[in-house]
Image (cartoon, grey):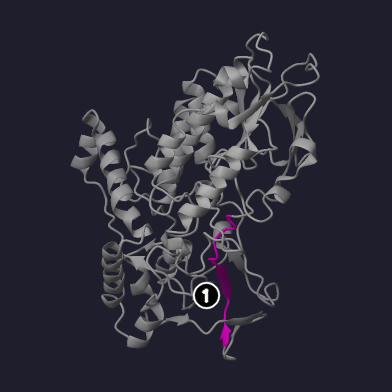
Amino acid sequence: MLSLLLAKVPTSRPARSLRVVIVGAGFSGIAMALAMTRDGHADEMVIVDAADDLGGTWRDNTYPGCACDVPSPVYSLRDEPNDWPRFFSEQPDILRYMQRVADDHDLRRHIRFGTEIVRQEWDEATACWTLTTADGETIEADVVVNGVGPLTKAVIPDIPGRDDFAGPAFHSAHWRDDVQLAGARVGIIGTGASAVQIVPSIVDEVEEMTVFQRTPGWVLPKLDREFSGLERLLLRSVPGAHRLLREVTNLILEHGVWRMLERDPRVAARLRKAGTWNIHRAVGDPELREKLTPTIEPGCKRLLLSNTYYPALARDHVTVATEGIERITPSGVRLADGTEVELDVIIWGTGFDAHHFWAPMEVIGRDGQDLHDAWSDHGAAYNSLAAPGFPNTFFLLGPNSGTGHNSVVLMAEAQADYIVQALEHLRAGRADWLEPTREAADAYAEEMAERHADLVWASGCGSWYLNDDGVNDTLYPGRVGHYQRRVATFDPEAWSFGRRRVAPAEAEPAIA
């Protein structure tokens, strides 16, 4: 089949090296760099990141209590075991792990920090991408792998008077250590994953706290604990112990938690019982219990894990406001019922835009096609990692790459392995560019929509998983293992191949 597809493509050109730019030095960018290193082509790549160090989400989010709600054995790279101190790791430990992996594989020599890419433009004639930085520098690349991730664009809702507040106001992703919380009246807007971690972490510090809740979500007990010294010793010294723990953890998530997303009524009932117990064990006030009890199906919104959130909300100096916010005022928040809540500090725990996270970076593909326009309704990419009209560019953790039950690190690694296989077709001189066919991309998008229709995310609640039109373009509607098998082998029959029209100019490599 491959010989038929490439019959019109000259095959006599010699093998060549590639100039590969990886945008982003977070988990997915590191996964891609390791895949290229294993493949023996580390010297072809450069990683660019706007910040002054690697880490992505785990570098940027430093709010009190910041931790992962995915178990550490699967929230790590498959060939890079770690001596994790606890089952659900905290932000400093995850960041140290990423830094250690990068140092062990000498990845920093490939990274250009302080390099923000604002535009990527494809040149059809030379089959080359030109990347423009915020400083006006241009970088040329044969292939671009975008690993900016979906949790980069913080969202602050457009509430009337949002900019009128006279005190400090900041998003959880832009935590301000210079703001004094001790003795302050603090308002936390939003009750998602970051707020569930922040509230109990600062509740003893503040004088008063008001948590503004729109819709309660399911908060389940967090089965977290520290690994004992003996357990850590065994994991370090027994061959295969880390891999076994990883596989067992993955099995539980894939075949236990996933059943909830398939709307298994028995699993849903058990989760409701666990979530209700979590409320009742900590909250004695019937009125507060009612405010905190969800009416949506478990899993429709992101499941949250905490043993300390509800006890914090039950404290005497904490109020849960559910009346809705009418506007932000210079002195605080006015609720829909007219109540004025005076505040000294506002913390926005309102999450990220997972649907337009490529903005403000421009990506201009074939015939001047703008990626923002192509994805104006919703994001769509073949195998969740490449789009027609954008040759030689890939998206790590792009549309429909997330999981509602397992680790995105597993998804990113599978995508990186697939991309490495695709690069071999270019490196072997069989073609100068490749992109998925429109037919393959449309079929994949249709499958995503059909599979989502039967899952819990389509049960009627609104969540950040869905865009404004109710389309779920963030999560993969299947088990991680299903996706891993799907992308295990590069499928050339789903791709178009072509040649440049103009020979590249003789020049020094542009990505040194």
Q: Nearer the viewer, residue 229 or 474?
A: 474
Q: Is residue 143 above or below residue 478?
A: above
Residue 265 visible in the current orientation = yes
Q: Nearer the viewer, residue 306 or 451?
A: 451
Going by the numbered disc 1, the residue's amino acid type is Val
Magenta run includes residue 341: yes
Within the image, what quadrant is residue 122 found in?
A: top right
Q: Is residue 434 left or right of residue 505?
A: left
Residue 452: give x, y in percent of width and height: 47, 56
Outermost residue on the left side: it is 230
Residue 17: give x, y in percent of width and height: 63, 16
Q: State the residue at coordinates (41%, 48%).
A: 478
Provide the secondary structure element on which disc 1 rests. Answer: strand
Outermost residue on the bottom side: it is 338
Q: Quadrant of the N terminus?
A: top right
Q: Nearer the viewer, residue 271 or 137?
A: 271
Residue 27: give x, y in percent of width and height: 49, 40
The count of marks equals 1
Q: State the residue at coordinates (47%, 25%).
A: 105
Report which residue position mark 1 lands on. 186
Q: Quadrant of the C terminus?
A: top right
Residue 172: give x, y in percent of width and height: 54, 61
Magenta run includes residue 362: no
> Which region of the structure is painted magenta?
340-354
Within the image, what quadrant is residue 121 found in?
A: top right
Classify mark 1: residues with Cα within 10 Å, few (<14), some (14-19) or many (20+). Answer: many
Q: Is residue 31 above or below residue 196?
A: above
Q: Is residue 244 above or below residue 503?
A: below
Within the image, what quadrant is residue 147 found in?
A: top right
Residue 147 visible in the current orientation = no
